[in-house]
Each structure stands twice: as C-alpha cells, then as structure tokens.
Image (tube, rainbow, N blue to C red):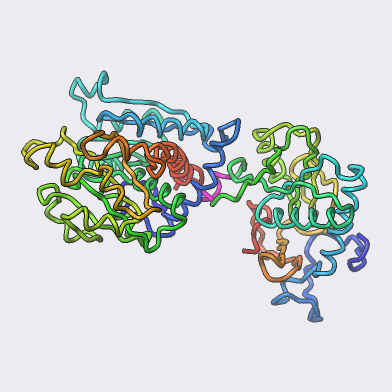
Amino acid sequence: MSDAAPDPRPDPRPDPRPDPRPDPRADSALDSRAVLEGPDIHRALTRIAHEILERTKGAGGVVLLGIPTRGATLARRLGDRIEQFEGVKIPVGSIDITMYRDDLRLRPARPLGRTDLPPDGIDGRIVVLVDDVLFSGRTVRAALDALNDLGRPTAVQLATLVDRGHRELPIRADYVGKNLPTAKSEKVKVFLDEIDGRDAVVLVKGPPAQRRTQEPAKGDAK
Amino acid sequence: MNRHLISAGDLAKDDALLILDTAEELARVSERSIKKLPTLRGRTVVNLFFEDSTRTRISFEAAAKRLSADVINFSAKGSSVSKGESLKDTALTLEAMGADAVVIRHQASGAPHRLATWVHGSVVNAGDGTHEHPTQALLDAFSMRRRLGGLDGRRVTIVGDVLHSRVARSNVLLLATLGAEVTLVAPPTLLPVSIDTWPCSVSYDLDAVLPKSDVVMMLRVQKERMNAAYFPSEREYSRRYGLDRDRFAKMPDEAIVMHPGPMNRGMEIAAEVADSPRSTIVEQVANGVTIRMAVLYLLLGGEIA
C-alpha cells in the first residue's frame, strides 16, 4: 500500500464515538468517506499491471477476465496498461457469475451480466480474474465454478482493487490494490469513471444495529 | 415480475425487456461446449401437456434441463386423465410431488389461470385453447429484436387464422407493450368479434400491407379447431392470404418472415419463402429454448415468494 494515507490497521469495529471534525473528503454525509481517490486508483492499477507482468514473466498466455460490472471495467484498464508497458496486447473478457451464485435463493432473480470470452478461449491460458471488491470470497468461488464450465486454464489468479477482509471461504487475492480494514456492517462502494463518471472507493458506515449483509458489497454503486 | 406467466398482457414493458435481455445473455450458453448452468439445481419443473405439442414441450424440457432443474413430463394420453381425473386433482397430485413450476398446455382457454389458484409453484402458460401462448410471443419478439435491432416503431403484420390463434393474441399484446405497430390481416370470418378492443389495426388486403411491413408473421390455419366453413376453399384462402413468391417480392428488402410452426407448406406459406434466408422459422425454434430458459430462471431462480 504505497501511496494511500498511512494505514495504522485500526480496529475493524466501527468507532462508537462520532468524529467531531467534518472529513474534508466526505462523500455525502458523515457516514461515508472516500478511501481511494482517482489518482490512488490509477497508481494501484499501474502497480497491479506491473505485478502481473512480473509474476507471469511478460504476461505471455495471460487472459484477463473481469467480473461484471466494475471488474470488467477494471480488467480493460489493466489490459490497456499492460499493453502500454510491454507493447503486448493481451486478451480481455468478462465472466458473469450470477447463475453460479450460492445466494440466488435469498433474493429475487437478478438480471444477468455479460460473459465475453476472448475468441481463443481460456484453455491452457493463465486466467487472471479481476474484481472490484474482495469480501466473503463467494463471488470468486462462483467465478471458479463458471470457469470450470468454460474451459481448463493452466492457472487462475485473482486481482482485486480492494480487499476488505471478512473472508468466508479459503480464497485469497494474488494482486491487491489496497487492503482496507472494514467492519462487516460497512459497505465499500467503488465508482469508476466509465460507469459512474468519477473514480473513487468510498467506505459507507453501516446501520448501528447490524443485520448480516447477505450480499457482498459488490454492485452497490448503481 | 409476477409469480406466474399466464398472459403476455401481464408483462409490463420492464418485465418484457428483462426477459429479452436475460435471454440475450443466455443465448451465449447455447454456443458453449458445456451448455448447462447449475442455477435451478434441486428445482422441479413439471410439463403438463393435455394437448399435442412437439416444439413447445421439447423446448421447455431442454430449457429446464440446461438450467439443471429436474423435469417431469406428463401428457394426458396414457395418464389418469383418460380415466376421468379432473384438472384440479391432477394439479394437487403434482403439488404433492413438489413441483416448483408447472408448464401447462391445455385445450381449454383459461386452464392455466385456474391452475394458478390451486398450486403453490409458478404456472407457465404453454398455450391454452385459443387464448394465449406468452412464451411464443416472447420468443417471436426476441427473434425480431435479434434480426432488426429493436422493436420500437417496427411494423409487424400478422396474417391468417387470428380467430383460433393464441399466438396472435399474445403477440399483439406483447408487441404493443414493446412499442411495435401491429396490423392483423385475415378474412373477416377468421377475426374474433372483440378485435376492435385489441391494441392493433386490422386489414383485409394483404397486398396493400406487405410493402409497409418490417415483419410478416404467418399463422397456421388451425383445421383441427375449425368446426364450420370459415373460407370457401383452401385454394382460395391460399391465393388471398398465402405468402407466395410474388407477395414475398413486395416486402421491403430487409423485412423478415416468421411462422410459429407447424407450417402448412403451400397453404399459408410457400416452401420457397419458408426456406429463404429472410425467414426466421428455424431460428425461432432455437430462440424458443433460450427464451424459456430466461422465463424459468426469472420465475424460479430467485427467492420463492
């Protein structure tokens, strides 16, 4: 975590005392604040792109697959950066995991996202899954199941802009933009220029009496 | 979305578009090597068919299986229905077997509506008498949208036996919701009396309407439902309302030809027209599986109310 504000690993539980100072970066009210701004996101993605190149020794055979909606956008950005740095164009696609979710029955049926595989497929490739927020790990588990029906990659890696902790499955990210300690009741919203008109990661305080969030904070920023 | 799909008229524009958009994504599943999704694992879909059907029953069965649901096929022939069991008792039997959805085709208009009051699961109308066939209308709209790009302001002409056609009624209702302009063309004897209440216009002159059509949908002449003489002879019907090569040439170059099947080749549609690249008849069958997957997913994929 190179460039964001110093991160003293605060207690993940929400601070019970209200902060008397208005946060200069406050998003709307006192209950939400931006933890990453445009330039922070830019730097984090640049670093991830370099890390992917390093780990995969030049990104030969790499396919970037974003999880819609914002993961797909992030995957495109990473693809552009890798092309910029090394001059190689790597295949970028998206993989919708809605039909593979384990919580489908907890909510009304949801609209599907887009699955767009590169023309050469994923067999024998190194697939890097890209998502905006890594939380329970259930989305990634669903993505692994979906991949299983689409082909047989040599290896699967995971890149995420924000890792907010609270994993419920044995899943970890290979590339992390920012480790963000959060309370379970809080929500992490990711805004991206292509979709939302600005770049930011915002932490929203949860309600005081917390109900367990069924849905990982994905897709909240509609 | 409602819990049931009984009438195309029950679908708001947003519901209809959600089904079409969902189908658009699911169409890609049919192009994969593994054409199966785990979404409806553990759910049971019963196909309850009191009337003969090939494509609709197979299509619903394929759709449910691609979503990993368990499928029970029930046809009236060879079942207790031929011993005189009532629809309600049959329904309660299915209910006791734990059906999450019942897909029903029945010769009586309104049967799915009655069924919906007896069972807890979702009821999907797969054709009831001369009333409605909503998934056919959805797959037709889907086929049109894929060929033409959008439906708003498109001119759709539906030709033939409107009186006995559940496809026509469902299509008129759905297409009106989606913003298309529908014209029905038929002999006066084959139009229902209430036709002026339908959201469409009516013409008796096919040749005048063809040049102004983006879509021409031919309906089957349903001889099995005709208990009177609705037109003098098949030959005369075919000459006035059949889509032959000359009439096909009058359509705009981009216009498409549709038919819900099964076709009476040589009667309402010439073989040459049915097999032309501008005919969507085979596509309609493939799209049928996709659209039924979308409907089953949206009815059963989420939490059950």
Instruction: Decide: is A220 above or below B169.
Output: below
Of A164 and A175, which appears nearest the observer?
A175
Is A58 in front, or is B138?
A58
Q: Is residue B81 left or right of residue A130?
A: left
Q: Quadrant of the C terminus of chain A?
A: bottom right
Residue sitting at 85 percent across and 41 percent down?
A60
Q: Using residue B50 as the reference point, say whether residue B145 is left or right of it.
A: right
Q: In the figure, is residue B244 to the left or right of B41?
A: left
- A176 lies above or below A193: above
Residue B47, quarter of picture: top left
Give me the residue at 19% from left, 39% from top.
Answer: B221
A206 or B14: nearer the eye?
Answer: B14
**B238 relative to B46, above or below:** below
Magenta part of the protein: which range? A104-110
- In the picture, the quarter occupied by the N terminus of chain A is bottom right
Q: Is residue B113 magenta?
A: no
Residue B243 position, x and y percent, is 25, 44
Indicate the quadrant where residue B14 lies. bottom left
| Residue situated in front as seen by the camera: A134 or B36 | B36
The quarter of the picture where residue A150 lies is top right
Residue A105: in magenta span: yes
Task: Find residue A29 and report its horizontal and vertical position in percent.
Answer: 70, 77
- On the image, the x and y values in percent for residue B72 come to 40, 26
> Which residue is at 89% across, 52% downward?
A86
Query: Does residue B159 sit above or below B85 in this rendering?
Result: below
Residue that sits furthest to the top in the current view: B78
Image-based side of B188 in relation to A146, left or right: left
